[in-house]
Amino acid sequence: MKIKTIRAKNFREALFLVKKELGPDAVILSSEDKKGMKPYVEVTAAIDYDIDDHSGKVQDTAVRTDIIQRETEVPRHSASETCSSDLMSLQADIKNLREYIEAMKNSGFELKMPEARRNIFHFLREKSINDEFAMKLVERADAIEDIETVMSDDLNISRTVRNPFGQIRDAAAKDHRRIIMLIGPTGSGKTTTLAKLASMAIKEGKKVAMISIDTYKIGAAEQIRIYSRMIGIPLDIVANRESFRKSVGRFSDRDIILVDTTGQNPRDAEYISNLNNIYKMGMSIETQLLLSASSDCNFLMDTHKYYKSLPIDFMAFTKTDEAVKLGAIYNLCRLYQKPVAYITTGQRVPGNIEFVDSKKLTNLILRTGSV
């Protein structure tokens, strides 16, 4: 087990240093705001290592003596007895500390911040906003002169963090490219959303066609065929790049060509490679990344490692009506740094799609019932 105290200018920098020096599995033991001529933050963190109880050997005894110091009297026994006794005592101490850290993990540790900042931090965490991003928001809110008057009331806190929260970019009105391709993991609702967008374009008097390159999922072709017949627009289902190129040429008279893609796990390198091959054809394609707001937050954060290699223009969040919390929207906007084009709020076609601005998105994420 390794325990370390880190001093930094602010909580965000301290957390960064904890992760850098101890790794992502480190646990925060305490965190305190230090006042004075040069104020700083002091964070104590620990990382757990295994002890080989059978051999009696401590695999990592890097308990920092600058943090925890033990004063012991050396009994008048033989050197081997003393060494064995000290080793057993040290093992017991580490075991107790490990149990303490594990209990903190299970019960949820609260940082020792001033009350106003702690209230904001826990409000944001409750909305499923990533701890690091929540800490940055707390720091921005800290610039508000009357932050110490922020009470524990959720509505009051929600109003306080709105200004520093305003980093979500919405998709400003513009002339979109003629080819719009929807990408995203399995279950993100690409085909249904494609039909919603097609219906809206038809209402605006535009000529629309659809292309599907989803030949992977059973039933995908039949689903999009049903939408094609229902909306009354042509559809091509293609299996390779050359077929895709021919379809785009066949629909050259159309204002918009909407492209549906295979939904697969983004960790699949071949899947990402196949998507990249489409862009290598040299066509001007607008790419919209669809992510389900009801999906596991950790999975959504993990997708960034894989989709970031693609030329994404916009993000869109589906199934917001099914999500209990919408903090993932903020997390992903921070990661991808892309504007949000729209959200979907149900399965109905046409309908259940909203082109929201940043204010509306902020309200949705921070909603407290009456906001």
Image (cartoon, rainbow, N blue to C red):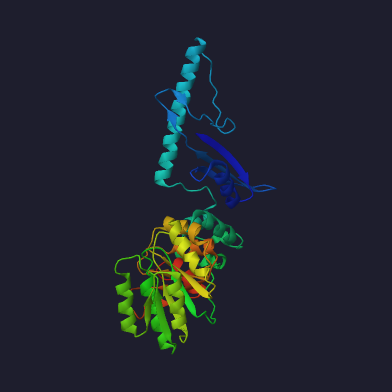
- Please tell me which residue is depicted at 60% across the width and 42% down the height of the picture: 6
In the rendering, at what x and y percent does residue 334 appear?
53, 62
Q: Nearer the viewer, residue 44 or 151?
A: 44
Q: Residue furthest bottom?
A: 205
Q: Nearer the viewer, residue 367 or 352?
A: 352
- Please tell me which residue is depicted at 56% across the width and 38% down the height of the picture: 4
In the rendering, at what x and y percent does residue 235 appear?
37, 80
Quarter of the figure that contains the C terminus: bottom left
Q: Is residue 15 above or below residue 295?
A: above
The number of numbered discs placed on residues in the rendered structure image is 0
**Residue 303 visible here:** yes
Q: Is residue 50 above or below residue 32?
A: above
Q: Is residue 71 above or below residue 80?
A: below
Q: Nearer the viewer, residue 154 or 30?
A: 30
In the rendering, at what x and y percent does residue 170 appear?
52, 73
Query: Splitting the image into 4 quarters, where does residue 53 fall?
Result: top left
**Residue 128 visible here:** no
Q: Is residue 96 above or below residue 176?
A: above
- Please tell me which residue is depicted at 32% across the width and 77% down the height of the picture: 225
Q: Residue furthest right?
A: 37
In the rendering, at what x and y percent does residue 331 appear?
49, 61
